[in-house]
């Protein structure tokens, strides 16, 4: 009889993604969107909470922010200064 297999030490991609912090662009919605900056958080809700603290937003502004998840390649381009637009 063979011994049972040990569970793998590696986390599944879904589990790993849940623990990782992602970078989010924070936009304040007005007549035109005003990009406030970027925050790091696990999900959109946490990103909005982090943005409220980081950018010192009042209650009205907190209700008017939008966050966009930045993929790794977008972050690298922006940090290298090669972004156009």
Image (cartoon, rainbow, N blue to C red):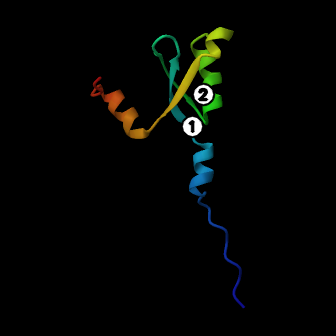
Judge by depth and name the residue closer to the eye, 79 or 83. Answer: 83
Label 2 element class: helix
Left or right of residue 51: residue 70: left
Q: Are marks 2 and 1 in contact (CB under 8 Å)?
A: no
Q: Is residue 27 above or below residue 77?
A: above
The residue pinned by badge 1 equals 21
x then y, percent, for residue 63:
65, 16
Label 1 packing within 10 angstroms: few (<14), some (14-19), many (20+): some
Q: Is residue 31 above or below residue 8?
A: above
Q: Is residue 73 above or below residue 39?
A: below
Point 51% across, 11% down: residue: 30
Point 62% across, 43% down: residue: 19
Point 47% across, 16% down: residue: 33
Judge by depth and name the residue closer to the eye, 10 or 48. Answer: 48
Label 1 element class: loop
Q: Which mark is residue 29?
A: none
Point 65% across, 9% down: residue: 60
Point out the residue furthest to the front here: 31
x then y, percent, for residue 29:
53, 15
The residue pinned by badge 2 equals 47
């Amino acid at each position: 009889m063979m011994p049972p297999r040990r569970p793998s030490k590696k986390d599944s991609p879904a589990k790993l993604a849940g623990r990782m912090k992602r970078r989010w662009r924070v936009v304040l919605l007005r007549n035109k969107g005003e990009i406030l900056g970027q925050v790091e958080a696990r999900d959109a809700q946490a990103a909005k909470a982090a943005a409220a603290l980081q950018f010192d937003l009042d209650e009205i502004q907190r209700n008017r922010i939008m966050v966009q998840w930045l993929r790794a390649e977008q972050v690298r381009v922006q940090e290298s200064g090669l972004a156009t637009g």
